[in-house]
Amino acid sequence: MITAAPWVMYPEILAKDEEKWVFRTPNKKDGDDVHGLIASCPPLDVNSSYCNFLQSLHFNQTCVIALCNDEIAGFISGYRKPQHPNELFIWQVAVSPKHRGKGLAFHMLQEILMRDALSDIDVVETTITDDNQGSWNLFKKLDKAHGEQGEVSTFLDEEKHFKGKHDTEYLYRIPIASQ
């Protein structure tokens, strides 16, 4: 799926008239660019580039790339949960530092949720560390857009699960109202 005129629905993502935006599913050629984008977006965990190639190929129907003037501006990776295929787990949201503050992350989430192949999704989940305010704001916005029924719980504890090597990951579970 490619959407080339998102400013009609989301005018806030255009900073300048000369910017050309494209939203599409990723492909195998995008893996290295995705890896570079994620590396430029702390506090995101940088996985192997191989992981990003797999996301761009095997999980591309639940991922989205945003391009601005043919340059990668954003990426969201996600997957259907194997035991609960009507639930979409959003793994990472990355927006290039020069494209932040334009509503791009929310637009990318909406792009994924509007896909015909994902019309049966009734829950979105993600995990967020306490200090990742950008992600908290994004998923609170998604929750608000769908009736503010979301719930937050501890998913992986810093001491119990990560043995002090990673901050606690909180699970944000958001029921998605029929669209």
Image (spheres, grey):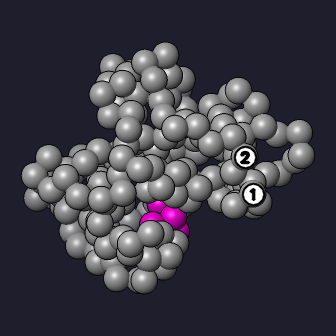
Vertical relation: 91 (above or below) 120 = above
> In this picture, is 117 found above or below 172?
above
Residue nearer the viewer, 90 or 49: 90
Q: Residues within 10 Å of mark 1 (few under 14, many from 20)?
A: few
Name which residue lies at 58% across and 37% down.
2
- The CA span between labels 1 and 2 is 6 Å
Point 50% across, 22% down: residue: 30
Instruction: Give the residue number, with chain letter if any, for mark 1.
Output: 8
Q: Is residue 133 left or right of residue 49?
A: right
Q: Amino acid at mark 2?
A: Ala
Span shown in magenta:
135-139
79 and 122: which is toward the camera: 122
Q: Nearer the viewer, residue 151 or 177?
A: 177
Disc 1 element: helix
Q: Which residue is mark 2?
A: 5
In the orientation shown, which residue stands out farthest toward the top? 29
**Residue contact between numbered discs 1 and 2, judged by CB atoms under 8 Å:** yes
Q: Residue at x 36, y 24 (%)?
A: 57
